[in-house]
Image (spheres, rainbow, N blue to C red):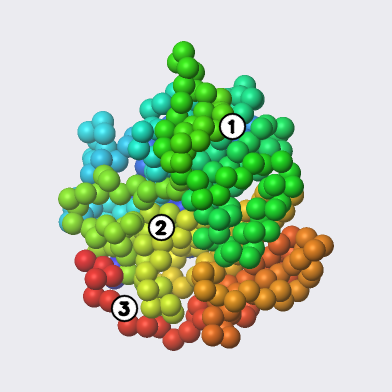
């Protein structure tokens, strides 16, 4: 395959910018266009629910690169323009303003839209956290509210609740799980996370679904649970997951199944690639498709996409990884913990709040978790390499259409 003369990256996210930087590092001198829906320069999302929400970082500190560094990339930046359609055959993107942008290679890095609960969206006093503007606005509201209810007990919801509590707010965290992040951590470790939150004054309402908000004289007063209970709140934050931003690709001919379906090389169609939260790729070693929502994946997958655009034919076979900081604890997870895995403490001491846990299925490690032991967890990661880098499984015919 010949190297394309120009590349269009749709989505000025961490993944999108990493594609541009990887291409330039590899010596690519062709024309690059980076199209972004938001008006500002690319920024980092992990600090939004932590440092920005806590007020310890201002908005500018989240920017991924200084203006001079962006300029040195010799890239055409088109910000504040939303992509509305893709012509796969022509590799042309149309924007909401009617502009058409085309290239010989197109990369889709549009990320996620926050999922909204029926009956809550559009209600005053109910917020989501996805963008930098969301974080700045939520910070302002958090300082004014006496009581906050966070709906959603996954990673983002737990982080928001933890940050709000650290800033002195009265916080209730609700969700369908028995403990925060149970799906990501398993029951045993999630119980420890629940104890951490409770110990810092977060009110946990496990197995609790929110049905609607309550208000008086135009101001939110709380939320009503499915069981009929009213939880008082002057501020409500929805953190119930994200939906891949693929709505604009309907009718494009690309396979869209909880993301843009790609082959093991992150290719969705000839000359069309995807990277980051929006990409569902075939993991050769595991023999199944994955869509990973984390900062590390955004960068690593972008590097693979750049390599493949330049003809390297590289399969993407990562050891999945994510991390979260909550209430003075850093949790790092390598691999994919499963609900049926047996959890062993490999190093450290649970009671001392520093340990590494290993998740095993049929005696084989499938994941490693570090609780305030980053170096040891990284070393334990080596035990996962046979699983995630083993001989490739045959790729299904539907991996790319």
The residue at which mark 2 appears reads as 275
Mark 3 vs mark 1: which is more N-terminal? 1
| Residue drawn where x is 67% and y is 76% of the image | 344
* Viewer-side label of 2, 3: 3
Q: Give the quarter of the figure containing the C terminus.
A: bottom left
Give the distance between the C-alpha atoms of the residues marked 2 and 1, in whole angstroms: 35 Å
The residue at which mark 3 appears reads as 395
Q: Quadrant of residue 170?
A: top right
Residue extending farthest to the top is 217
| Residue drawn where x is 30% and y is 49% of the image | 246
Q: Is residue 93 visible?
A: no
Q: Quadrant of residue 392?
A: bottom left
* Viewer-side label of 2, 1: 1
The residue at which mark 1 appears reads as 148
| Residue drawn where x is 55% and y is 59% of the image | 182
Give the distance between the C-alpha atoms of the residues marked 3 and 1, in whole angstroms: 47 Å
């Amino acid at each position: 395959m010949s190297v394309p003369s120009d590349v269009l990256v749709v989505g000025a996210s961490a993944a999108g910018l990493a594609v541009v930087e990887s291409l330039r590092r590899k010596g690519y001198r062709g024309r690059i266009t980076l199209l972004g829906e938001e008006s500002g320069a690319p920024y980092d999302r992990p600090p939004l629910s932590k440092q920005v929400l806590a007020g310890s970082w201002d908005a500018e500190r989240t920017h991924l690169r200084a203006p001079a560094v962006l300029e040195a990339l010799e890239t055409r930046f088109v910000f504040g323009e939303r992509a509305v359609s893709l012509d796969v055959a022509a590799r042309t993107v149309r924007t909401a303003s009617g502009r058409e942008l085309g290239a010989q290679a197109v990369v889709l890095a549009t990320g996620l839209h926050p999922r909204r609960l029926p009956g809550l969206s559009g209600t005053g006093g109910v917020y989501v956290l996805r963008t930098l503007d969301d974080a700045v606005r939520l910070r302002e509201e958090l300082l004014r509210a006496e009581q906050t209810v966070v709906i959603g007990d996954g990673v983002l919801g737990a982080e928001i609740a933890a940050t709000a509590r650290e800033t002195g707010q009265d916080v209730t965290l609700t969700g369908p799980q028995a403990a925060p992040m149970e799906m990501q951590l398993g029951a045993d470790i999630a119980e420890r996370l629940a104890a951490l939150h409770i110990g810092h004054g977060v009110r946990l309402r496990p197995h609790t679904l929110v049905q609607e908000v309550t208000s008086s004289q135009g101001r939110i007063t709380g939320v009503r649970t499915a069981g009929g209970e009213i939880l008082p709140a002057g501020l409500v934050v929805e953190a119930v997951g994200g939906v891949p931003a693929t709505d604009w690709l309907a009718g494009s001919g690309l396979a869209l199944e909880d993301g843009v379906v790609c082959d093991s090389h992150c290719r969705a169609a000839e000359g069309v690639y995807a990277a980051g939260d929006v990409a569902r790729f075939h993991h050769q070693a595991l023999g199944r498709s994955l869509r990973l929502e984390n900062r590390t994946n955004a960068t690593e997958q972008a590097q693979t996409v750049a390599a493949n655009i330049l003809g390297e034919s590289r399969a993407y076979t990562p050891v999945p990884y994510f991390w979260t900081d909550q209430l003075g604890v850093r949790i790092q997870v390598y691999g994919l913990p499963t609900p049926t895995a047996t959890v062993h403490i490999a190093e450290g001491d649970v009671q001392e709040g520093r340990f590494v846990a290993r998740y095993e299925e049929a005696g084989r490690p499938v994941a490693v978790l570090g609780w305030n032991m980053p170096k040891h967890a990284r070393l334990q990661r080596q035990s996962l390499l046979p699983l995630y880098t083993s001989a490739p499984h045959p790729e299904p015919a539907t991996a790319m259409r």
